[in-house]
Image: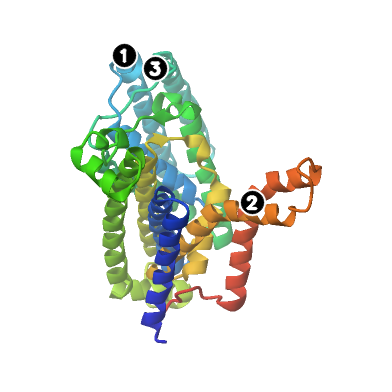
Amino acid sequence: MTGYLRNVALFAVMGVALALTGMYQSWVLALTILNMSLISAVMALGVNIQWGYAGLFNVGVMGFTAFGGLAAVLIAMPPVPEAWAVGGFGAVLGLMLGAGTIFAAILIWKRLPPGKLRVLALILTLVVGYMITRFVFAPATAAIERINPATEGYLGGLGLPVILSWPVGAVMAAGLAWVVGKIALGLRSDYLAIATLGISEIVIAVLKFEAWLTRGVNNVVGIPRAVPRPVTLQQYDWVQGVSQRLGLGLSDTARVIELTGYALLFVLVLAVLIWLSENALNSPWGRMMRAIRDNETAARAMGKDVTRRHLMVFVLGSGVCGLAGAMMVTLDGQLTPGSYEPLRFTFLIWVMVIVGGSGNNWGAVLGGFVIWFLWVQAEPAGRWLMDALTSGLGVESALRSHLMDQSAHTRLIMMGLALLLMLRFAPRGLIPEK
């Protein structure tokens, strides 16, 4: 079998697995897995751009994803006029003062000659700037958070169509990556991983605790949808007709139609990204990036600005992750900062890239589908396995109850097993880099 036919067969097997899920479990579940697989594939593409193209070990994937997801709130949610009235001006002014303090500190460090005077001026600027910023910013945000805290307590957004948040999320994550890259890309690969993980934790902590911006752990719910809600779809005559023809309940039919609409949007986004990624990878720019990845010293000797190229690819990959974050928040209809667990889900995305095939865009997409499918189906499979293994024990058995309660952790075992098997029998992934 040629490589092309083998790749097509792998995607076909994945399609059959989703179809069987729909037939034997539910079509709502199958389409939910499909949508999250598409989003995971976009995230895996972003990581593959960084690692597969340039060898950058970014462990802060969740930070950029969460920051991109914030765009859905800032763009789509309606503004809260009362919050803006009591503290909007103070919050904006405080942010400007904070940015001005940082800018002034940078100017002092660059303009003054090295010595004690520069250090003292820098410390004085930062301390005074922090005190002034805090004096303006803290009362304003406290006033905002007191406005109807049960349902609001934040500034809200612009009230624009939610689909506009996708490119905005990509730009926001790319901007954050530019700042991070200017600081951290001079580090060696292992130190870069530590730095990006720490920055990811900082970003998620900001989303959790700056309630005036994101409602923090109270979550932002009711984000406008890119596709009509099932309750709205149920009112249409054609949806009721489809429900009768398929023999499904009206609510299930509406949910299936909604998820299908999201799947079509996500497929369109993924198709555009694949087309752009493939053209970039096979261009002179892509060959240059792989040359830098394989031998930085030789690339520098040929006159290539390695640091600048690393920054470029870091920004691109993080922007794609931010796009995926905005898509995920749109699908969920809510922003839940507490659900972004950097170590757990970053590991999952990296497994997708490694299993699919590092350096191959189609491999990253396939890895996103395979690993997310296994992640979702591992828990019911583990429960079935534990039930079969303990079928001889009584219903009151403490051992049976313990094993059944722990069956959810089967998914972690399955992820580790999948990674070990791939590294042993197919170390270059399901679809290796050419």
Q: Provide the residue designation for mark 3.
A: 144
For badge 2, the amino acid type reads Arg
Residue 205 to residue 48: above or below: above
Q: Amino acid at mark 1?
A: Glu
- Quadrant in which residue 169 is drawn: top left
Indicate the secondary structure of the residue bearing disc 3: helix
User: Would residue 190 be found to the left or right of residue 171 on screen?
Assistant: right
Q: Quadrant of the N terminus?
A: bottom left
In this view, the residue farthest toward the bottom is 1
Sequence-wise first label, 2 or 3? 3
Determine which residue is flagged by label 2: 383
Residue 151 is situated, as x and y percent measured from the top left of the image, at 40, 20
Q: Name the residue located 29 percent from the left edge and 41 percent from the top edge.
A: 165
Residue 246 visible somewhere in the drawing: yes
* Mark 3 vs 1: CB contact within 8 A: no
**Neighbourhood count class around disc 3 (C-alpha, 10 Å): few under 14, some 14–19, many 20 upward:** many
Q: Is residue 419 above or below residue 378?
A: below
